[in-house]
Amino acid sequence: MTEPTPSPKAFSTTQLLLLALICVGFAVAPQLIVKAPNEPTMGLVQRIFYFHVPCAWQTMIGAFIAGGASAVYLFRGSEKARQVAIAAAELAVVFGLCVLFTGPLWARKAWGVWWQWDVRLTTSALLWIIFVAALFAERYGGPGGPRLSAGLMVFGAADVPMIYISVSLWRTIHPKTSVVPTLDPSMRLALWTSVLTFTLLFAVLMSLRIRLQRQRDRLAHLTMRAEDAGLFDE
Amino acid sequence: MRGFSMSNLRSVRTQTVQHLCSVGVCLALVCGLSAPAWADLAPLPDARRTAPAASPAPAASPAPQPDKDGFVPESRPMNGPTVDESIPAGPLVATAYGFVWIAVLGYIVHLGRGIRRVEGELAELEGKLSKSLSKS
């Protein structure tokens, strides 16, 4: 087993550049969101859209990466793939939580209810639960935990296309995916700025989380070595 | 243990914590800078009541026809009388945005603590291992 060497710097130049862009994005996005026109049927509450949708996309990206990396881990046993999968799954859970929290707030005003057992909402909740279960399996599943977790992540990633096409396949009260291409230009600019900023944030958090996972694995490896050397017998 | 010394680890840990603190400060600063924008966004719940009675009705321009699948921009001014506010939208929007900020910042803090703790434990173990190796 090769020992990962920590990077000599806390942040690489690329990460610092991305962080600067993220700060600019989060400073500019609110201005654009405020300048975007109100939507006539929903009014002010529709502005949740500008954070809700980017979070949903990051959830899906995280789930896809986690599923793909888990498949690589299952078939090739690559530890790096496992680290990537865990990092992506954790981010999918964080952004998924944002989606599942902001969505009902929007629904309360737009639909009059906090929650509907609509296909889009149900499959999104299911995705989040699957990835939470996968992270629990990874952490507390014992020796077989990583493989069980990887299997769950592959299963969860299969839910992503289902979520995306659900609004087109079934009757649903959730806005369709065709909303985005037909947006007013000022609405579109606000949305894409938010999406870009959240995507950059996802990239930076992902790289930091992978690094943490590598350090954890290295710590586990060194602990085993120390136990073998009888270091803890004293 | 190639290229992996305790002092190196400590400096990396210190740098990481410093950078994560600076990220947190930057994000807090960005929140603060964008605060005026959010203040502008706050709804005016009494706008309808405080509007002058004799104020002219909005121009009789054709109302935007919302596409059944899409969002259509409203033609009326933003802070004027808008849609029915029986359920106030302002607190819902503020809660949604606030939650996302708290979740992201909370996750950054969680990551920073995790990295600091793991790198601290690694440094300690490295020290013990190198001592035991030098003894033997």
Image (spheres, rainbow, N blue to C red):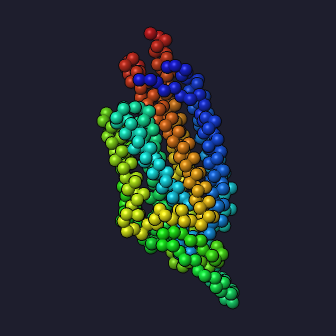
Q: Which of the pair A153/B132 is nearer the observer?
A: A153
Q: Is residue A118 visible?
A: yes
> Residue A138, percent across and down?
36, 40
Q: Which of the pair B101/A86 is nearer the observer?
A: A86
The quarter of the picture where the C terminus of chain B appears is: top left
Is B60 on the left or on the right of A4, as rendered? right
> Residue A6, percent across and down?
53, 28
Q: Quadrant of residue B14?
A: top right
Residue at 60% of width from left, 82% of height from top? B62
Q: Is residue B99 visible?
A: no
Above or below residue A166? Residue B78 is below
Callout count: 0
Q: Quadrant of residue B79?
A: bottom right
Q: Quadrant of residue A126?
A: bottom left
> Residue B132, percent across and down?
46, 15
> Residue A9, percent across and down?
60, 31
For this orientation, the residue located farthest to the bottom is B54
Above or below residue A144? Residue A185 is below
Residue at 65% of width from left, 65% of height from top? A35
Above or below residue A171? Residue A51 is above
Residue at 39% of width from left, 17% of height from top? A229
Residue at 64% of width from left, 73% of height from top? B78
Q: Which of the pair A82/A189 is nearer the observer?
A: A189
